[in-house]
């Protein structure tokens, strides 16, 4: 009989412990009810091992076999997949919205309105070539147009830098999360060495994984020790157990950051898959295209206005003045090993080449690259190089440029044309100066970009701030009544002069249409992705979320169980006391 009471007492004891553990877990759930990274924990009860008796095996009570988080792995993977999509569309929509605002013409004060006012001023001057008011109005409208282009160019450049900063910071965040996940893997392994699951550490691990998937598209698997192995698209490892592989970002010649894998220098931009990183890259690509298009249109405006105005005579019977000025970018390649620098050659053999540009024979406003195919000193000092039109991708033939060499420098006069009549007066006169250092070496490059900074830097020629300097006559002897140049310029608005296919209005309308369409698409996809993600979050919350009402019900249940086992212990104690008194 004593053995029976002892077993009953032990049964009550382990039952009280099981209830106490369950109450402790309920309290932990309630405390973390507002923790978004927490998953509800449940204590699983099982009967303890029975003991033999005359009447057969007899039960010995209950115990907590394990404590688990309510976690649906497949649902969690779906949520992470959609988080990557949502992150991509969110960052893309945000980036494109900023670009779209730059091209906002709804109030009539945008670029389209300023262009219309500019062409109208030229028409007015053509109708009244001697009018001082018309000349002053033209210079004013030209300055406003240039200022509008400057503002748009600066805004796009700023947004481009913002997207680059986001991307660069994103690489740092990925590396930081990868470090944390590697450390978390090791901590989980050490904490579970004696069995059981460290649910709180695993929750933090999953939260980091979820945040990482929002940044970049990843694939992962979990081994039987709770270690997460995480790979990027393309199979590049990011975290393997406690071993971490870092990414790095590097800026190219234009200052745009790209992602690379570790010390291998493997470019990763095409393997980002989705996530915010992919969205920032796509938004930047769209912005760069819009920026290039705006610069291209501005370049066409500068080029055609200058070529026409250069031929005209002003009220002082002077000629050879450009209408718009802007910055033409000249740069040596970042990987060059020589000390040669590139600049315009103002002291060219052509008298009509101010600042190294012969506007009369300038054939286009494309970008060019000079690439040396051998060291300068090879072949008795005769340089070997190619000149490529970067806009068309075509190499110029030798009849399109001339080279004049002297000690420590070489002057290259070239243009992208095969017209032999233009040979004596090429459009660009460039100088490579290496008097104080190493001459050009094989694979050295030098670039000329007419339009890279066109929108940001276009401005009215300062000489034309005096309206009398506006040149609209094509005949020296017919100043001031001749308006032929003004008519020619006014007609440019109706001609397909942008890339030889579009008018200025058509080109700009196409530009804002492309930007608007891309922005609308991104916003629509963001809304769709958000709807799907919200539905998945609701499903996950129904599995892993903490319900205060449900926990309170469980608390009462375990409280009553605890009280009952306590009462049972009290009763057994009284019975054992009676038994002792009888002895």
Image (cartoon, rainbow, N blue to C red):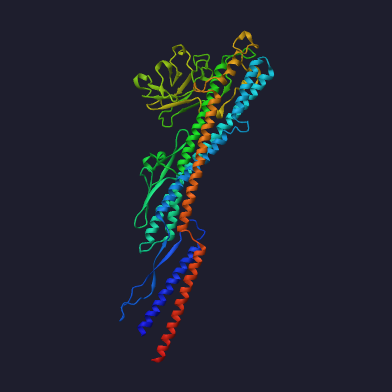
Comparing 528 with 235, the one in front is 528
Q: Residue at x 50, y 70 (%)?
A: 556
Q: Dividing the picture into quarters, in which one does residue 512 lie?
A: top right
The image shows a total of numbered marks equal to 0
Comparing 17 with 143, the one in front is 17
Image coordinates of residue 27 in percent, x first then y, are 49, 66
Quadrant in which the N terminus is drawn:
bottom left
Quadrant in which the C terminus is drawn:
bottom left
Q: Is residue 78 visible?
A: yes
Q: Is residue 158 left or right of residue 340?
A: right
Q: Dividing the picture into quarters, in which one does residue 122 lie?
A: top right
Image coordinates of residue 275 in percent, x first then y, are 45, 44
Identity of the residue furthest to the top in this view: 477
Q: Is residue 11 left or right of residue 486?
A: left
Q: Is residue 327 visible?
A: no
Comparing 364 with 38, the one in front is 38
Image coordinates of residue 199 in percent, x first then y, are 42, 60
Image coordinates of residue 565 in percent, x first then y, are 44, 77
In the image, residue 534 above or below residue 286: below
């Amino acid at each position: 009989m004593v053995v029976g009471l002892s077993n009953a007492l032990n049964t009550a004891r382990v039952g009280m412990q099981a209830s106490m553990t369950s109450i402790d877990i309920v309290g932990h759930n309630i405390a973390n009810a507002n923790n978004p990274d927490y998953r509800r924990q449940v204590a699983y009860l099982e009967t303890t091992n029975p003991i033999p008796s005359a009447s057969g095996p007899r039960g010995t009570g209950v115990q907590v076999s394990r404590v688990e988080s309510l976690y649906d792995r497949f649902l969690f993977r779906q949520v992470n997949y959609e988080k990557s999509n949502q992150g991509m569309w969110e960052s893309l929509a945000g980036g494109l919205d900023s670009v779209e605002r730059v091209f906002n013409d709804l109030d009539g004060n945008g670029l389209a309105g300023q262009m219309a006012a500019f062409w109208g001023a030229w028409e007015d001057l053509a109708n009244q070539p001697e009018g001082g008011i018309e000349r002053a109005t033209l210079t004013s409208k030209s300055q406003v147009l240039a200022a509008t282009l400057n503002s748009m160019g600066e805004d796009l450049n700023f947004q481009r830098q913002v997207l680059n900063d986001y991307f660069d910071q994103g690489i740092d965040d990925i590396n930081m999360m990868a470090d944390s996940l590697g450390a978390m893997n090791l901590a989980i392994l050490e904490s579970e060495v004696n069995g059981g699951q460290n649910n709180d550490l695993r929750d933090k691990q999953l939260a980091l994984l979820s945040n990482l998937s929002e940044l970049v598209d990843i694939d992962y698997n979990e081994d039987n020790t709770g270690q997460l192995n995480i790979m990027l698209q393309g199979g590049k490892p990011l975290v393997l157990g406690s071993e971490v592989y870092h990414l790095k970002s590097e800026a190219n010649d234009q200052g745009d950051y790209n992602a690379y894998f570790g010390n291998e220098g493997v470019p990763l931009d095409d393997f980002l898959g989705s996530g915010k990183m992919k969205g920032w890259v796509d938004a930047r690509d769209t912005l760069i295209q819009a920026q290039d298009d705006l610069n291209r249109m501005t370049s066409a405006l500068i080029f055609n206005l200058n070529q026409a105005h250069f031929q005209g005579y002003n009220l002082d019977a002077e000629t050879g003045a450009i209408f718009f000025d802007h910055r033409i970018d000249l740069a040596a390649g970042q990987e060059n090993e020589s000390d040669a620098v590139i600049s315009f050659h103002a002291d060219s053999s052509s008298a009509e080449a101010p600042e190294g540009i012969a506007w009369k024979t300038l054939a286009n406003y494309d970008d060019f690259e000079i690439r040396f195919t051998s060291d300068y000193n090879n072949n008795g000092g005769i340089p070997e190089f190619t000149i490529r039109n970067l806009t068309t991708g075509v190499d110029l033939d030798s009849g399109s440029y001339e080279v004049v060499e002297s000690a420590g420098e070489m002057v290259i006069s070239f243009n992208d044309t095969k017209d032999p009549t233009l040979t004596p007066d090429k459009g660009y006169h460039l100088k490579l100066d290496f008097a104080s250092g190493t001459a050009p070496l094989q694979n050295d490059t030098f670039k000329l970009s007419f339009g890279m900074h066109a929108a940001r830097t276009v401005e009215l020629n300062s000489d034309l701030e005096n309206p009398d300097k506006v040149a609209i006559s094509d005949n020296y002897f017919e100043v001031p009544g001749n308006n032929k140049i003004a008519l020619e310029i006014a007609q440019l608005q109706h001609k397909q002069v942008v890339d030889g296919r579009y008018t200025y209005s058509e080109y700009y309308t196409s530009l804002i249409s492309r930007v608007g369409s891309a922005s609308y698409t991104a916003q629509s996809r963001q809304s769709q992705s958000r709807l799907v993600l919200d539905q998945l979050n609701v499903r996950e919350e129904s599995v892993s979320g903490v319900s205060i009402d449900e926990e309170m019900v469980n608390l009462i249940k375990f409280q009553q169980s605890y009280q009952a086992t306590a009462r049972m212990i009290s009763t057994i104690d009284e019975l054992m006391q009676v038994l002792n008194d009888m002895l």
